[in-house]
Amino acid sequence: MIAIEEAGSTVEVSIYGEFTLADYRRLEHALARERGAHPRVGILVDLRAMTGYTLDVAWEEVKFTRAHAHDFRRIAVVTRRQWGTWLSWIAAAFTDAELMLFEDPAAAQRWLAEAAAR
């Protein structure tokens, strides 16, 4: 399951359980809406409650990130698990967005807000 909140030029995403292709499609649509309204979007992804993801999600993430390499200013990933590091490495390989891992969601929000204030 996925929860998405669009707030200004930031999209906040929380993933619960297994991250599926249907969830990923909802995320893509939310990001497309924000990109239409703001030149460079910030993303906060909370993976603390994610239990896994399907292979098709991983493939779609690579394709999406490559197609939108310049559309995001910062990506904050909140995680306590190892796949946060793996996902960060994949995203960093295909985008020029600043990417940072956090254990505290409030710190991630502050980091995104500081970039939006510039």
Image (spheres, helix red, strand yellow):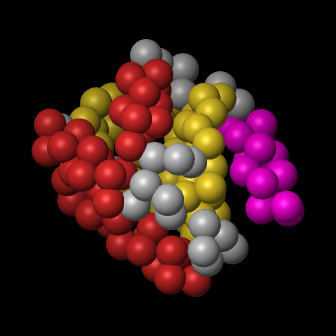
Q: Kindly give the residue lying farthest to the top in the view shown.
A: 82
Q: Is residue 109 magenta?
A: yes
In the picture provided, is 56 more to the left or to the right than 80? left
- Tell me which residue sits at (55%, 58%) in the image: 72
Q: Residue at x 27, y 45 (%)?
A: 62
Image quarter hosting the C terminus: bottom right
Residue 78's quadrant in the figure?
top right
Q: Is residue 37 magenta?
A: no
Find the residue positioned furthest to the bottom.
Answer: 37
Q: Is residue 25 visible?
A: yes
Q: Is residue 64 left or right of residue 38?
A: left
Q: Nearer the viewer, residue 1 or 47?
A: 47
The dominant secondary structure in magenta is helix
Which residues fall within the magenta stretch? 105-118
Q: Position of residue 24 (x, y in %)?
A: 29, 56
Residue at left offset 73%, top offset 51%: 112
